[in-house]
Amino acid sequence: MSGPRVRLVVTGDDFGYCPRRDRGMVEAFVAGALSEVSLLVNGAAASSAAQLARRHRIPAGLHANLSEGRPVSLSAGSGASLLGPSGCFLGKTGFREALAAGQVVLPEVREELRAQLSRFRDLVGREPTHVDGHQHVHVLPGRGEGGLPVPGLGEGGGGTAGVLCRCQVGGQSPAPIQADAPAPPPGVRQVFAEVLREYGVRYTRVPVERGLHRCEWLEPQLQTFAVALEKDALAAREEFQELGLRCPDAFIGLSTMGKDMSVSRIEAAIDQAVESIQIPEDALKGGRAITLELMAHPGYPSVSPVGGCGEGPDDFSQSWERLHELQTLLDPTLHNFYRQRGIKLCAFEDL
């Protein structure tokens, strides 16, 4: 089947979380099934993961983490707004709750992001190819914007975060915004973009996936999450663009995460993403490729107590679904699809 040129970045998130997951991602990269990794610099295996990236020449970005484990910044001591009593981040839901309540001190966010970027440089020996957010924290707004936390949605590592779109809370619509209302204060996403520009990082992730409402296999909490995430990510994309950050034309990964991943679903998601992208015909004829990112969390499942970001591995990392993702990405049928569609796997720096 002929069609436009497509460049696909397949990113393995949570690199550095534990040696077993890292081993699986290296195998996927060597086999041509993975083209990037996002490194958790506060992960238990961050140092060995960085060595693997250098040895195998794996393009690596930073998986900026503000929600799980221990901070990297030395100034994030007791009483810091990002931390709980144990000295660890507040968790996926806890961070969002604190942010919505106006309890997160944004200069602390800036300091932690700078510390993680510096740590990445020390480990890998260069700047990251891209920076995205663990549990999508990088697209979050400031107080009173975007999604609101929903207690009870688990603390899993990959995709579903405890948020609910404000227009759905209790079935009630939010109060109308006055025309002369002051602009909202800077949020996490603005601080994130400013720090990336400061460090010369050009690429990030905008996790907006088309057609999720038609994915009947998704659990209700993930559907709910996607509504809030899309709202936050669309607003973030505007701020990212204003500050010169770039991202692929489309994102895939929420509909194909964990047990929901299959070859047929990846194929369908790619085809739908390509069809939805509006690029002038003359640009395509001139060689402009359509660019996509597929987010994945492959690897061999963690075995407690090894792994994590300072608190041991979570259920998400210990799940059989990590191996399922690895096996799906390695499936020859998927690679035949890539060849038939003229899809070339690449890194962010190749876009």
Image: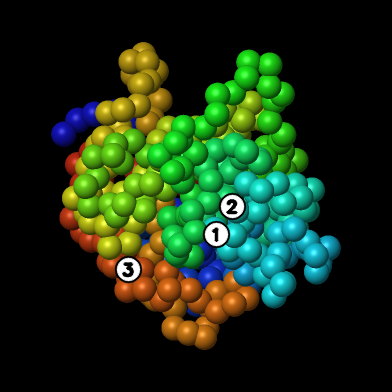
Counting residues from the N terminus, which is met first, the one under dot 3 or under dot 2?
2
* Identity of the residue drawn at 55% across and 29% down: 175
Where disc 1 sits, the SS reads: helix
Tag 2 residue: 96
* Identity of the residue drawn at 48% across and 65% down: 155
Residue 54 is situated, as x and y percent measured from the top left of the image, at 58, 64
- The correct choice, above or below, for 203 with respect to 120 in the image is above
The answer to whether one can see residue 65 in this image is: no
Marks 2 & 1, CB-CB < 8 Å contact: yes
Marks 3 & 2, CB-CB < 8 Å contact: no
The answer to whether one can see residue 145 in this image is: yes
Where disc 2 sits, the SS reads: helix
Per the rendering, the mark at residue 92 is 1
Where disc 3 sits, the SS reads: helix
Say which of marks 1 and 3 sits in front: 1
Residue 157 is situated, as x and y percent measured from the top left of the image, at 47, 64
